[in-house]
């Protein structure tokens, strides 16, 4: 059984430094100090944080008693939701469910939650720039860690 606590501990207290949209409804939240990134075309890409939450699809932003919006909301609302996370720090991280999903709570009262609604696996990952920790994701219905040595 994979222990997610090194990833949770690495996230607690980190500040959201950048939020961006990937292909389709893919969500990327960058935590901590940013490192510039170049695309293969040599154009500037989105910077990488010390830790990245990637949710391929099926995500939502929650307030205390309601849903602010999510991957099925109007795409025009996404930039405003993303902006609300900037500068907020992580107060809690939960990995939950029979098929693991992730919930991250922030100092501004918002929470980001993954929730796969299609066939297959939950499609989220915590990507770190620390080779000793690696990356946390879901494979075959269980938490999985990929490290540079695996």
Image (tube, helix red, strand yellow):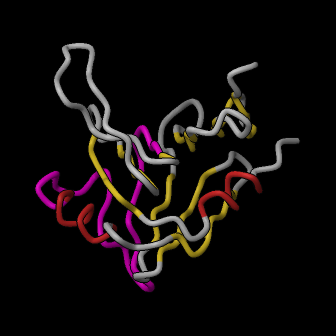
Q: In terms of depth relative to the viewer, which is nearer, 61 or 83? A: 83
In the rendered image, residue 133, in percent from the top left (x then y), is placed at 71, 40
- Point out the residue furthest to the left here: 76
Q: Residue at x 43, y 53 (%)?
A: 33
Decide: is 52 above or below 62: above
Decide: is 67 above or below 82: below
Q: Residue at x 41, y 47 (%)?
A: 58
In the rendered image, residue 136, in percent from the top left (x then y), is placed at 65, 40
Q: Residue at x 70, y 55 (%)?
A: 97
In the rendered image, residue 51, in percent from the top left (x then y), is placed at 52, 48
Q: Is residue 15 left or right of residue 13?
A: left
In the rendered image, residue 129, in percent from the top left (x then y), is placed at 56, 38
Residue 62 included in the magenta stretch of the image: yes
Looking at the rendering, which quadrant does residue 64 occupy?
Answer: bottom left
Q: Is residue 3 left or right of residue 127?
A: right
Decide: is 48 above or below 131: below
In the rendered view of the protein, which quadrant contains the N terminus?
top right
What are the residue bounds of the magenta stretch?
53-77
Q: Is residue 40 left or right of residue 56?
A: left
- Point out the residue furthest to the top here: 41
- Point out the residue furthest to the right here: 1
Q: In terms of depth relative to the viewer, which is nearer, 48 or 126? A: 48
Q: Residue at x 32, y 58 (%)?
A: 70
């Amino acid at each position: 059984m994979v222990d997610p606590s090194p990833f949770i501990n690495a996230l607690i207290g980190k500040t959201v430094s950048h939020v961006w949209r990937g292909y389709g409804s893919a969500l990327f939240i960058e935590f901590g100090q940013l490192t510039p990134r170049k695309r293969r075309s040599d154009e500037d890409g989105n910077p990488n944080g010390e830790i990245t939450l990637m949710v391929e699809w099926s995500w939502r932003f929650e307030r205390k008693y309601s849903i602010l919006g999510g991957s099925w909301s109007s795409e025009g609302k996404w930039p405003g939701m993303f902006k609300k996370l900037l500068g907020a720090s992580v107060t809690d991280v939960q990995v939950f469910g029979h098929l693991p999903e992730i919930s991250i709570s922030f100092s501004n009262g918002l929470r980001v939650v993954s929730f796969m609604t299609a066939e297959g696996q939950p499609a989220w990952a915590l990507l770190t720039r620390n080779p000793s920790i690696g990356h946390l994701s879901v494979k075959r219905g269980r938490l999985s860690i990929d490290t540079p040595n695996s």
